[in-house]
Amino acid sequence: MTDGLPPTTLRIGLPSGSMQQSTIDLFGRAGYKISVDGRNVFPRIDDDKLSAVLFRAQEISRYVVDGIVDCGLTGHDWIVENDNEKEIVEICNLTYSRASSSPARWVLAVPDESPIQRPEDLEGKIVATELVNVTRKYFAARGVKVNVEFSWGTTEIK
């Protein structure tokens, strides 16, 4: 990428949105000060060898693969969702979230009183999710045919 930065500058993709502040805090604990001005997607870092860009966490692995950034912080789930497992090297597992230091989990959930008790009980049903590819792989591995539809967030209420 020809962005005018010296070739020795490490370009990092950082998550915007709900993970932005906890990511900035994580860098702060490592001794770096990151400043974001309003809606500017190019935060300042107090190290001239680092350059950052804010992206949706869902997009970061694709931008690493495409060479737009050298590395990035995103979830393993988004690497799998974007089918980037072969092109991405996961260096470490940083257990942090916007609300806790526990790892995030994606779950298949139904109400307590639901007749659906196992994934196989969803045969022929519609499953709404943000992780379409991950969900398709999950059900395909179990031989369960479902119609997987995309849904942005708060899927559990739809």
Image (cartoon, helix red, strand yellow):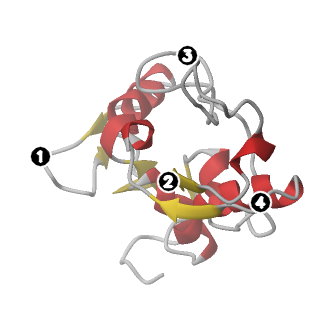
The label shown at residue 130 is 2
Assign the C terminus to one quadrant of the image. top left
* Closer to the eye: label 3 or 1: 3
C-alpha distance separating marks 2 and 3: 22 Å
For residue 117, what is the image quadrant?
Answer: top right
Q: Residue furthest left?
A: 38
Vertical arrangement, residue 131 with respect to residue 108, above or below: below
Q: What kind of element bears circle 3?
A: loop
Label 2 with label 1: CB-CB less than 8 Å: no
Dot 2 or dot 3, earlier in sequence: 3
Vertical arrangement, residue 136 with respect to residue 114, above or below: below
What residue sits 43% from the left and 34% below the top? 23
Dot 2 or dot 4, earlier in sequence: 2
Q: What kind of element bears circle 1?
A: loop
Quickly name the residue at label 1: 38
Left or right, 138 with respect to 150, comes to: right
Left or right, 130 with respect to 78, comes to: left
Q: Position of residue 118 (x, y in %)?
A: 77, 35
The label shown at residue 101 is 3
- Residue 45 seen in the current view: no
Report the amino acid beneath label 3.
Ser
Report the amino acid beneath label 1.
Gly
Label 2 with label 4: CB-CB less than 8 Å: no
Q: What kind of element bears circle 4?
A: helix
The label shown at residue 118 is none
Report the amino acid beneath label 4.
Lys
The label shown at residue 137 is 4
